[in-house]
Image (cartoon, helix red, strand yellow):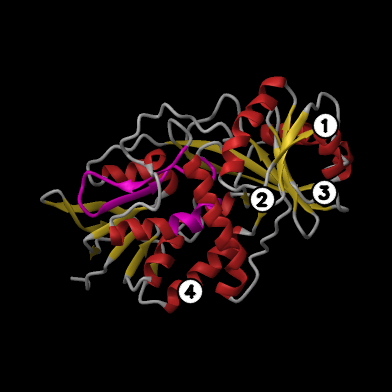
């Protein structure tokens, strides 16, 4: 029998690593079990955006805490994670979208975000290379930005190894041991058994399957997405640009000159597939060039597939479950990388103290899904 751990975290992506890091800082002996290698799911395929501009109070507060931690990672880890606040510029090409931005603005300002509604001419001052055709305006926060996901994961793993915790890769959980409606441990496909009275499901796109290992159902649907990155091009603009049209896209230029971006397919494509497609490459190129014609000479050097973990209302589940000691941090809807630092801190407090840091209703397991995130 393996020596008991205080907490077992299922999933070695950014949510699992951040949670283990914060639990370890609080003296917990944590075991992370990852079915493949760190970031092999969604984290290693994301483009690294970080923003506080959301439409619900809980998510805004979550991101304010994440940004606070991203700003200190150079000091915390001892190296740069390439965190940069170049801002997020959300564009409006129709009056309804612009009105949505205006409706959300009072909440964002009340919670302390540095954000403002812009007319089209001001948008072009921030991003002069934008195609102005049909542009009505936008909303901008200079305190949003990006970081390099692999560097952030490296930092967490480095610090976790200094703690009392362990990380085991290529260890797939296929059973959660439940006795008298309480979590007691897990078993892996290799036949190993590990014991702990607290288990955190942080398995990203596989969250639903992992929950079923304990007899629970999670309303999470994996959804296919793709992204691309170009070779280095001369500077265009520092901000992340988000074109909210149904046939829009979003992208930014990294500090090394590469442009990285993606789009959300309409209709959505359910499933866990990481293959890239020619269809995406052609369509993403068209959408990017419509927005910034100056990128016509940029060469795409790589494109790839990944997946989001979607919930009915666009907000994650970060909560305890009906099984004592079993917690979930799943359904990030494409925002797991940016949420992770805050979720790591707050889920550790929920596990250890049983207290929620603020009104947690939009992340609860029992919510009714009537409130939709408007800035997905």
Q: Quadrant of the C terminus?
A: top right
Relative vertical location of residue 281 with respect to residue 24 in this rendering, above or below: above
* Disc 3/disc 1 C-alpha distance (Å): 16 Å
Q: Which residue is mark 4?
A: 159
* Disc 2/disc 1 C-alpha distance (Å): 20 Å
Looking at the picture, tell me which residue is in the foreground, 282 or 164: 164
Looking at the picture, tell me which residue is in the foreground, 37 or 182: 182
The answer, for residue 42, to whether it is visible in the render is no
Specify which label sits upstream in the sequence, 3 or 1: 1
Badge 1 vs badge 4, beta-carbon distance below 8 Å: no
Query: In the figure, residue 186 lies in which quadrant?
Result: bottom left
Determine whether the residue tagged by mark 1 lies in a helix, strand or loop: helix
- In the picture, measured across the screen, residue 357 lies left or right of residue 108, that is left
Specify which label sits upstream in the sequence, 3 or 2: 2
Determine whether the residue tagged by mark 3 lies in a helix, strand or loop: loop
Q: Which residue is mark 1?
A: 120
Which residue is rendered at x = 67% and y = 47% of the image? 114
* Disc 1/disc 4 C-alpha distance (Å): 45 Å
Q: Which residue is mark 2?
A: 144
Determine whether the residue tagged by mark 2 lies in a helix, strand or loop: loop
Q: Which residues are magenta?
A: 315-344
Specify which label sits upstream in the sequence, 1 or 4: 1
Specify which label sits upstream in the sequence, 3 or 4: 4
Res 237 label: 3
């Amino acid at each position: 029998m393996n020596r008991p751990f205080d907490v077992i975290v299922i999933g070695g992506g950014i949510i699992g690593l951040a949670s283990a890091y914060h639990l370890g800082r609080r003296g917990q002996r944590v075991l992370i079990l990852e079915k493949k290698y760190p970031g092999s799911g969604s984290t290693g395929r994301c483009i690294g955006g970080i923003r506080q501009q959301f439409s619900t109070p809980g998510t805004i507060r979550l991101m304010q805490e994440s940004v606070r931690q991203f700003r200190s990672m150079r000091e915390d880890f001892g190296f740069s994670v390439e965190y940069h606040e170049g801002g997020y510029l959300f564009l409006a090409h129709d009056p309804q979208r612009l009105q949505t931005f205006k409706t959300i603005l009072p909440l964002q300002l009340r919670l302390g975000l540095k954000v403002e509604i812009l007319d089209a001419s001001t948008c072009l001052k921030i991003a002069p290379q934008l195609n102005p055709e049909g542009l009505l305006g936008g909303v901008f926060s200079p305190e949003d930005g990006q970081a390099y996901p692999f560097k952030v994961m490296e930092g967490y793993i480095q610090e976790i190894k200094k703690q009392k915790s362990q990380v085991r890769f290529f260890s797939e959980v296929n059973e959660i041991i439940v006795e008298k409606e309480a979590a007691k441990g897990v078993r892996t496909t290799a036949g190993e058994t590990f014991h702990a009275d607290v288990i955190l499901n942080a398995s990203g796109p596989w969250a639903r399957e992992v929950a079923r290992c304990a007899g629970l159902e999670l309303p999470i649907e994996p959804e296919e997405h793709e992204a691309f990155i170009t070779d280095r091009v001369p500077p265009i603009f520092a901000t992340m640009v988000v074109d909210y049209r149904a046939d829009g896209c979003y992208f930014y230029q990294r500090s090394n000159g590469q442009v990285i971006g993606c789009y959300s397919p309409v209709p959505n494509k359910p499933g866990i597939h990481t293959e890239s497609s020619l269809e995406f490459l052609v369509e993403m190129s068209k959408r990017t060039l419509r927005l910034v014609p100056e990128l016509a000479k940029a060469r795409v050097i790589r494109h790839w597939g990944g997946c989001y973990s979607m919930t009915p209302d666009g907000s994650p589940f970060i909560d305890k479950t009906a099984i004592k000691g079993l917690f979930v941090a799943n359904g990030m809807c494409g925002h797991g990388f940016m949420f992770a630092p805050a979720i790591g801190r707050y889920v550790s407090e929920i596990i250890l103290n049983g207290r929620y840091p603020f009104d947690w209703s939009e992340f609860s397991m029992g919510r009714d899904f009537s409130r939709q995130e408007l800035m997905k």
